[in-house]
Image (spheres, rainbow, N blue to C red):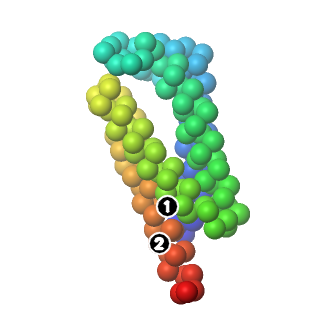
Amino acid sequence: MLRAASILLHTFLAVGAIAAGQAFARHPDGRDLAMDVRWLDGSPFPDYRIPGLFLALVIAPLNLASALLLWRRHRGGPALAFCTGLLLVVWLAIQTAIIGLRHSSQALWWIVFPLVALLGWLQLRDRRGAEPAR
């Protein structure tokens, strides 16, 4: 159950990160995703191009790799899923620190991203508990 939920979440997040990353690359002013470039005033970013590239080139592949490793029951799957979940929480914390709570999706992500990390940690814990003692 935990594994299946993680695979679905990581797959969904990978597809979403690719879509959002492409939207930001296509229109760095954020208009495709109802983001206002003025929210970035005072940040290190003049527009959403760099965050978009990070979504497409880091967040998406890590989520896809997490889903794939979990699907294949690779022993590194739970650890990667947990680390990817932590990265998502850090990503959202940085985003919130820079732009504040301004977009409706942020409330959803504050639920989903910690859940992704928790599911990864639970699988990691269960896997370690199942390994024979040395």
Q: Residue at (66%, 59%) from the top-left corner?
A: 69
Q: CA distance from mark 2 to mark 1?
A: 9 Å
Q: Residue 84: which numbered mark, if any?
A: none
Tell which residue pokes out farthest to the front in this image: 134
Examine the image and state in which quarter residue 93 appears.
Answer: top left
Query: Can residue 50 be seen here?
Result: yes
* Residue tagged 1: 120
Examine the image and state in which quarter residue 98 appears.
Answer: top left
> The residue tagged with tag 1: helix, strand or loop?
helix
The image shows residue 109, relative to residue 30, as above or below, that is: below
Horizontal and vertical percent for residue 23? 57, 22
Tell which residue pokes out farthest to the right in this image: 72
* Residue tagged 2: 125
> The residue tagged with tag 2: helix, strand or loop?
helix
Q: Residue at (60%, 32%) from the top-left corner?
A: 56
Q: Residue at (32%, 25%) from the top-left corner?
A: 99
Examine the image and state in which quarter residue 19 appears.
Answer: top right
Which amino acid, mark 1?
Gly
Horizontal and vertical percent for residue 78? 55, 63
Question: Is disc 2 surrounded by few (<14), some (14 to 19) or many (20+) residues within 10 Å?
Answer: few
Is 96 on the left-hand or right-hand side of 48? left
Horizontal and vertical percent for residue 47? 45, 14
- The answer to which of 82 and 19 lies nearer the viewer is 82
Q: Residue at (68%, 55%) from the top-left corner?
A: 68
